[in-house]
Structure formats: structure tokens, C-alpha cells
Amino acid sequence: MARWILRLGAAATAGLAVSGLYVASRVDPNDIGLVRIGRAVATTAVISFDYMTSLKRVEYGTEEYETVKSQVHRRSAEHLLDLCCANKGTFIKVGQHLGGLDYLLPEEYTSTLKVLHSRAPQSNLREIQQVIEEDLGKEIPQLFVSFEEAPLGAASWAQVHKAVLHDGRTVAVKVQHPKVKSQCAKDIILMEVLVQGVAWMFPDFSFAWLVDEAKKNMPLELDFLKEGRNTEEVAVMLKHFQFLKVPKIHWELSTRRVLTMEFMEGGQVNDREYMKENGIDVNEISRNLGKLYSEMIFVNGFVHCDPHPGNVLVRKSTRTNKAEIVLLDHGLYQTLTEEFRLDYCRLWHSLIRSDMKGIEMHSKRLGAGDLYPLFACMLTARSWASITKGISQSPVSKKEDVEIRLNAAKYLSSINELLNKVPRQMLLLLKTNDLLRGIETSLQTRASASSFINMSRCCVRAVSRYEKDKSKSWYGKLKISLAEALVLWQINLYEILLWIKASSLGSWIVDILRHDHPLQ
């Protein structure tokens, strides 16, 4: 076995070098650069060789093995971070995606790669000016009274500058980094070949799902006109949520590479100190964020899939004095098919009710197969024991949270197998779930049952609406409506009981009962 690993290790560098030559033959070396290819190939080879040589020295399953494995994870994550920062563009985007999978990947990777959200490259003002002039046909002074040179923020694809229009309105101007679009397609080819090389060396670790997501979503994210349309669509779709604010688009100053929108400011959604200073209730924000995403996922099937803290702001309205959620960066959306959305609704409804037969059936319908217990744990970020007892009954504890994160490393090969089996629509939802849980953890609201209550309501409404649309008789529609009303009433009653239990009124009732029944 050891000799086989050593032979495989020796073959790794050679195999990846061939991959690099293959990629170089398919792209223009003057455009992407052999240094860029060599950097990616070398990093993959170093990481592969580290796993092969380090883990073979210790006995599998021992405490020493777990310690060494954690050290290799950390070194590998740091190598990946260096590669992403050096190659930029697509590599940073993929690194950010991996950094958001807190409950699916080992902690060593996610904690290391999270810094990419604040270490994205910046273009200088001359490069930004060139893109604006090429796309809008005018120089910056002709378009804006003022244009701040330092960007408000920089991302993998673009950066945002604050500016003032000639009519006095303040806007945010999102400008794409030069050459990003041409580089993106070639980066994906490079990643695809490297992933194939890793799958050849480690059959249990095929990251084809990651490349598939990059190939499908990245070209869409590079079209800012598409982002503008997404922004307007979600604003109309969720206009009944008075607490939600999305920026208005200035179409006359927008192109595929430049997006000019209403300027909105606030504190990041994970900034508890900002909320405290501005009198914003963190529980209300967490509750409303849950309502927002439950509505998008279960009812509408049109989901904003990048809710990292930099894209979700909170503020106190100067007009109403109520807390508002500002949703930014609408480039990455997932449109769910009706069949998938309904299966997902029914699965979550089963999870909330601890319906084990329903969990198994709907997980299998979503491609999980016999790995459905692991799939349920991935979706909920709860242990299987908590799922069988009822995730809405027992709040998540710190001990359970640590256990889930440790299991992400323990079951990495099975998790990877699942990610390659489930429908592609599921991948961005898993990322979205993890980012939302990260926000709840920062706000210290993960123990709250409100998110499950909101999910329950949306699942019931979505399935009832579907069944009413299918029913051809008024009597059938009436029965479905009455059943829906009854279930929603039960959910409301359950929420009231939870509120009483958590409030001072609940403590008062308990005291009275204890006084009346001293032997209890």
C-alpha cells in the first residue's frame, strides 16, 4: 500500500505537468501566461504530495492521524489562499465559494479562505476610467460631478466607487476589472483539467461539482445588465416586505461592464456592535432575514445566492425609524424548477416535523440515495440525533456546532460524493444555507426557532398553492385552502407558545404553578 502511494505521489507531479501543457495548448500563452498556469499546477502538485506523504506515516484512525490531517488541511488551505491571491479573478471567486461552506468543508479550509472576501484585487483609477469610457462613451467628469478614486469595496470581478450625478443624486458605480471576462473562460479550462488530475489521483475526491458551478454561473455574473434585471425582479417580487431595500438601477449609465445604482449605506449584517449603537434588534434582523430567504427559496424559487455579510447591510430608516435590510450584489441568482422546489419544500417540512419516512423519500428524490442521513445533516447543520428528536424542538448547542464542523472533515469523501450526485440547483442552496448560518452565528441567534417557523409557513404556502393550481374543482380548492389555514394557525399558535415560554410572562406562570403545586 505504501509503495502504491509513493508511486502515485511520483506520478502526481508528472500528471499535473501534462495537464498544464494541455491547458497551455488550448489558450493563448500571451493572454493567460505560462506563469499563471504553472502556479496553479505547482500548487495542486504540492498539496497532493503533502497529503500523500504526510498521512502515510501515521496510523489511520488514531489521534495522531487526526492531528496530522488537520495540519495538512491548514497548510493546503494556505497554499490555496496564496494561489487565489496571485492568480486573482476566477480563482478568488472559487476560493470565496469554498470559504462560505462552513458546514460542508473542514474548518481549516473555510477559516483560511474567508479572508478572500476582503482581499480581492483592486484596479487603479486609470483602468477603471478606461472601462467607463469604452462602455459609456464619455469621460468620468462628463458623467459625474464627483467620482471617488478609492473604491468602497473590491470583489473578484469588479469594484464599486461612490459618485455624484449632475442632478445631485449619489450613486454607486460598479465597474468590472479589465480583461476579467476573457480570462474567466481560460481559468475554467485550467480548473477543469486540474480537477480531473486530482480525481485521477484521489478517486474519492472528485470536485467536478465545483467546476460545473463555475462554468454555469461565472459568465452570468460577468453580465451586469443581467444583474440589474435580477435587482429589479427581486424588488418587485418581495415588495410586500417593507423592511427590504434594494438599490434602484440607473439604466442610462449601465452596460455589461458598468452598473450604476442608487447609493445605499449601512452596517454589515454580522456587526452586532453597529446594531447596538443604532438601536437595531439583532433578533428582529435574524427573523426578517429568515423570512426573506424562505420566501425566495420555497415560494418563488428565485434565490439571491451570495448573502455574505458584505452584501447584506442593516440600517435604521430615518423616515420610519424601523430597521431595514439592504440587499446588494444581485449577480448570482438560482432559479429553481417547480419540481425541485416542491421536493425541497416537502423535505424541509419533513425535517421540521421529524417525519423520518418523509426525510428519506424526499432526500432520495433529490438525489441523495442511501446517504440521506448525511444529506439531512448537511442541509440543517444539525446532528442526526437532533434531526430524529426534532430540530425545531431542541436548540443548537455549541457542542453540537463543533461536532458538525468536525464531521465535515471526517465525512469529506461522502460529502463530496453527495455534492456530485445531487441536482446542480442544490449546490448554490447549500452555499446560501451556510452563509446564512454564518450570519446567525455572528448574531448569536442560531438557537432561535424562528427560522424553522418561517420555513414551515413558506413550505405550507408553496405546496398548497401548487395543489390549488392543480385542482380543477372549487370544492377541491376550498378543502386545500381550509387545510392550509388550519396548519398556518397551528404554526402561529406554536410560535405564541414559544414566545410565552421565553418571556417574563412564561416565568410568571411557572412560578404560579410551582406555588400552587409545592410538591412538583
Image (cartoon, rainbow, N blue to C red):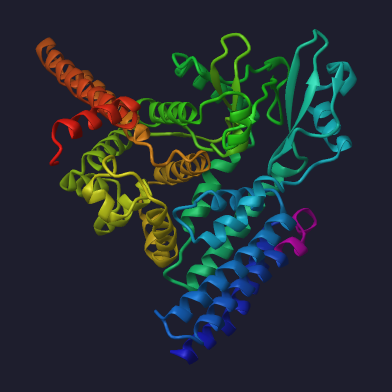
Left or right: 334, with 268 as reference point: left
In the rendering, at what x and y percent does residue 517 appear?
13, 35
Query: Which quarter of the rendered picture does the N terminus lie within?
Result: bottom left
In the rendering, at what x and y percent does residue 234 appear?
50, 22
Taking the magenta stretch, the answer to whether it contains residue 420 is: no
Q: Is residue 463 visible?
A: no
- What span is colored magenta in the figure? 28-37
Query: Which quarter of the rendered picture does the C terminus lie within?
Result: top left
Give the main secondary structure, helix, strand or loop, of the magenta stretch: helix
Left or right: 320, with 431 as reference point: right
Q: Quadrant of residue 223?
A: top right
Name the one closer to the observer, 84 or 19.
84
Left or right: 358, with 109 as reference point: left
In the rendering, at what x and y percent does residue 163 appear?
80, 21
Q: Residue at x 30, y 50 (%)?
A: 376
Name the one closer to the observer, 496 or 500.
500
Q: Quadrant of residue 111?
A: bottom right
Taking the magenta stretch, the answer to whether it contains residue 35 is: yes
Name the one closer to the observer, 170 or 323.
323
Name the one closer to the observer, 108 or 28.
108
